[in-house]
Image (cartoon, rainbow, N blue to C red):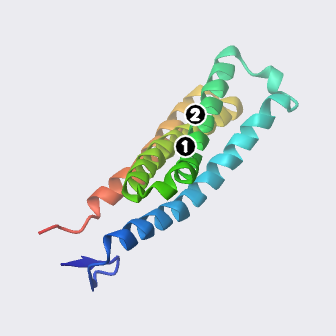
Amino acid sequence: MSDIDASGQQHPAEDPHKQWNRNYSELLQELRVAQTGVQILFAFLLTLPFSVGFEKITGSERVLYVVTFICSAIAAALLIAPVSYHRLAFREGRKPQIVRTAHRLAQCGLFFEMAAIVLAIYLVVEVVAGVRWAAFLGAGMALFYILIWYVLPMVTRPDRD
């Protein structure tokens, strides 16, 4: 049995233990990118209510802000959770379970990160340009994220024989 890497080359099958370790290392590298993005957004949203002009936003914009803020907090929690999970379980020989759980947490975290980004875009555009532009650009950005984060990986999968 052999594995096929990203370039399409075949390699001898690796030891399952090494494969789980490699998978976890790759996942952590990916999470570093996602965590940075959500942490920057979360920090921005944390400071927003204390900025000049925030008191001028409407009631519905305040609700939207809170939903966006909560989505970013959930995303941060989900994207950081695999680290905590690993710290608590790594000496118990449960690497496959850790990797599978971390993968699910990362997928959920990315969904909430996408929601927080799209909602933040909607909120900013609504305040700056109005509801129509916000709806148009918010929907466009949601579609764009869905296409590049979810559809693209599915449609570019190599055929499996």
Q: Can residue 50 be seen in this view?
A: yes
The circle drawn on residue 113 is 1
Give the residue type that dot 2 points to.
Answer: Cys
Which residue is at the far top?
59
Classify mark 2: residues with Cα within 10 Å, few (<14), some (14-19) or many (20+). Answer: many
Image height of 8 relative to 33, above or below: below
The structure residue drawn at horizontal position 55% and vertical position 43%, both measured from the top left corner, is 113
Q: Is residue 137 visible in this depiction of the protein?
A: no
Q: Residue under circle 2?
A: 71
Q: Position of residue 43 (x, y in %)?
A: 74, 42
Quick check: 151 left or right of 48?
left
Kindly identify the residue that appears in the image at 50 percent across and 51 percent down: 89
Looking at the image, which is closer to me, 88 or 121? 88
Q: Residue 9 carries which label?
A: none
Check the picture and name the quadrant holding the N terminus: bottom left
Residue 71's place in the image compared with 1, above or below, is: above
Q: In which quarter of the image is residue 9?
A: bottom left
